Image (spheres, grey):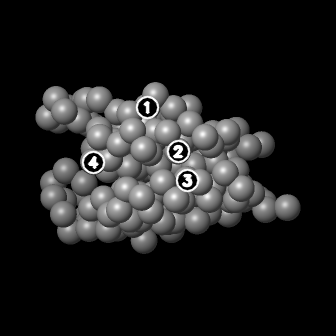
Amino acid sequence: MTQTIYILNGPNLNLLGKRQPEIYGRETLADVERLCREVLADGTDLRMMQSNWEGQIVDWIHEAREAAAGIVINPGALTHTSVAVLDALNAFERPVIEVHISNVHKRESFRHHSYVSLRADGVIAGLGIEGYVAAVRRLCTLLG
């Protein structure tokens, strides 16, 4: 039986590779997906999604309750503002890894707080898109 990892990406990540490449790099979400697929354990698949809409991300987290073995989430700016995303993640009973491409702790002070971290089983920041790969590897280990 195949286990699925959801990779959820929040606002503006559709512009990855184009928006502020000095901070976020030149790689795209397609590059993220390709790299993550390369490290999947046998019997594991992934579903890569991105939305600029908070409600869509909440809906995907709800869907994941029935369909996903774990979640990797880069909520973008919703990290710092969304109690709705936190509440949805609190209803998800499997592992959650929070990822940030940049080191949010070296940036503006408002980026230092994460609602998502209150639920996340692990947090990765500042590794570029390699952070997604580390998160997928960790979930594969946890899912055994």
Instruction: Identify residue for label 2.
Output: 88
Quick one: SS at disc 2? helix
Instruction: Identify residue for label 3.
Output: 61
Looking at numbered disc 4 in the image, what kind of residue is underneath it? Ala
Looking at numbered disc 2 in the image, what kind of residue is underneath it? Ala
Instruction: Identify residue for label 4.
Output: 77
Q: In the image, is 3 to the left or to the right of 108?
A: right
Tell me the distance, in whole angstroms, between the alpha carbons under discs 3 and 1.
Answer: 15 Å
What residue appears at the point 27 percent right and 48 percent down from the top-left corner? Answer: 77
Instruction: Identify residue for label 1.
Output: 117
Tell me the distance, in whole angstroms, between the alpha carbons under discs 3 and 4.
Answer: 17 Å
Badge 1: how crowded within 10 Å, few (<14), some, or many (20+)?
some
Q: Which of marks 1 and 4 is nearer the N terminus?
A: 4
Badge 3: how crowded within 10 Å, few (<14), some, or many (20+)?
many
Q: Position of residue 121 (x, y in %)?
A: 56, 32
Q: Earlier in the sequence, mark 3 or mark 4?
A: 3
What residue appears at the point 38 percent right and 33 percent down from the top-left corner? Answer: 115
What residue appears at the point 14 percent right and 34 percent down from the top-left corner? Answer: 108
State if disc 3 and disc 2 touch (CB < 8 Å).
yes
What residue appears at the point 37 percent right and 56 percent down from the top-left corner? Answer: 54
Q: Earlier in the sequence, mark 2 or mark 3?
A: 3
Q: Which residue lies furthest to the right in this view?
A: 1
